[in-house]
Image (cartoon, grey):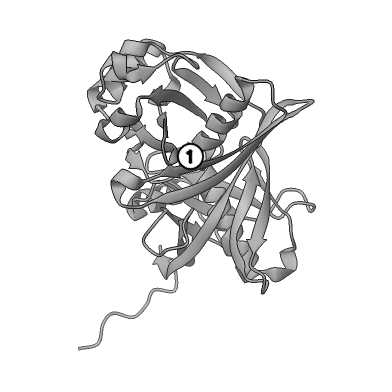
Amino acid sequence: MNGPASSPSVRRFEFVTVDVFTKQRFGGNPLAVFPHAEGLSDAEMQALAAELNLSETTFVLAPTSAGNTARLRIFNRTAEMPFAGHPNVGTGFVLARRNPELGDVLRFEEQAGLVEVRPARSETGEVTGAEIDAPQPLQLLGVMPLVGIAACIGLGASEVRTAAHPPLRATMGVDFVIVEVAAQALSRAAPSLAAFQQLAEAEGLADGRLSILLYAHTDAGIRSRMFAPLAGTWEDPATGSANAILCALLLSLGQDRRLECEVMQGVEMGRPSHLRLASWRSDAGIRASVGGDCVEMFRGEATL
C-alpha cells in the first residue's frame, strides 16, 4: 500500500550530531547542529532542542555583520542560552569541516557577544576540534550559601572546600556557581531538585537559573561535574563555559599572568571528556579559552 503523498508545505532541516571534548565515539558531550536554520521560528528551535533532548542544540543563521561567520543560537531543553562552551566548539568543528574556505578563525554572533573560534587541525590538515574564547572577562557575581549549595549537590557542608574560595557565582557570558569539594566526595555527589528549587527561589535567580560546577584537585589532576536540573540537565558530560570560569577563577586567586588547565569531566556518566583551558590577564580583565577534540556521529533531517 502506498503512503500518502508528501505535502508541499513540509519543510526539511538537516542536522548533524557531534561528540565534543573527546577523540572517541560515544564519549564527550553530544551536540546537535542545524547548519542551515534560516526559516525556523524561535518556538520551533526550542521544540527541536527539547525533542532531541541533548544538553544543547545549535542553530546556524546568517550573520548580521558581513565580517562575521554566522549568528549562532543555542538552546538547551527548556530555554535559549546566551553562550555555552561545547556548542561553540562543536559547531566550529562542523562548519570548518564542511566549509574549508572559512579559514583559521570563525566569528559567531551570540547573545553574550562575539565568540572567536579557532579550528584545530591534524598534521594532514583534517579538522579535529576547535578552541574558543569566552566572550566576556571573568565577573564574580557573589558568594552563595554554603549549606544551601551542599544540599543541592547532595554532600555535607564539611565536604565543601572553602580554603581557596567559597562557593562563588560567576560568569564569562553565562553564569555558574563554582564549588570546590573534597576529592573523595566528588563521585558521591548527586543533585537534589528540591534543594535547587529552594535555593534558586531564596537567591532570587531569574527563571530559576542555577547551575553548579563542582570540582576537585585529585592525584590525576582537576576533575569536575556539572548539575543543572532546573534547565533539564541532571548532569552534563562536559561544560566548556563553566570550566572556563573555573580556570579564570583559579588564575584570579594568584599572581600569575597566565594559567593553563586540563580538566576531566563526565567520568561518572561513562562519557569521559577532556577539556583544555587557558586563562590570562588582559586590560579588560581575566579572559579564558576552552578547546578540545570532536567526533562527528549522526546525520539526519527534521521535517516540520
Residue 286 position in % (x across, y down):
68, 27
The structure residue drawn at horizontal position 42% and vertical position 24%, both measured from the top left corner, is 180
Q: Position of residue 46 (x, y in %)?
A: 42, 46
Give the x, y percent position of residue 189.
Answer: 27, 30
Whether residue 10 is visible here, answered yes or no, is no
Q: Residue furthest bottom?
A: 1
Q: Quadrant of the N terminus?
A: bottom left
Instruction: Describe the element under mark 1 as helix, strand or loop.
Output: strand
Seen in the picture, residue 96 relative to 260 is either above or below; the reply is below
Residue at image mark 1: 80
Residue 302 relative to residue 88: left or right: left
Looking at the image, which residue is at 67% across and 51% down? 117
Q: Amino acid at mark 1?
A: Glu
The residue at the point 42 percent across, 70 percent down is 300
Q: Nearer the viewer, residue 71 or 270?
A: 270
Instruction: Decide if residue 277 is on the left or right side of residue 190.
Output: right
Can the viewer see residue 184? yes
| 54 lies left or right of 40 | left
Q: Quadrant of residue 281?
A: top right
In the image, residue 207 sits, relative to residue 133, either above or below, namely above
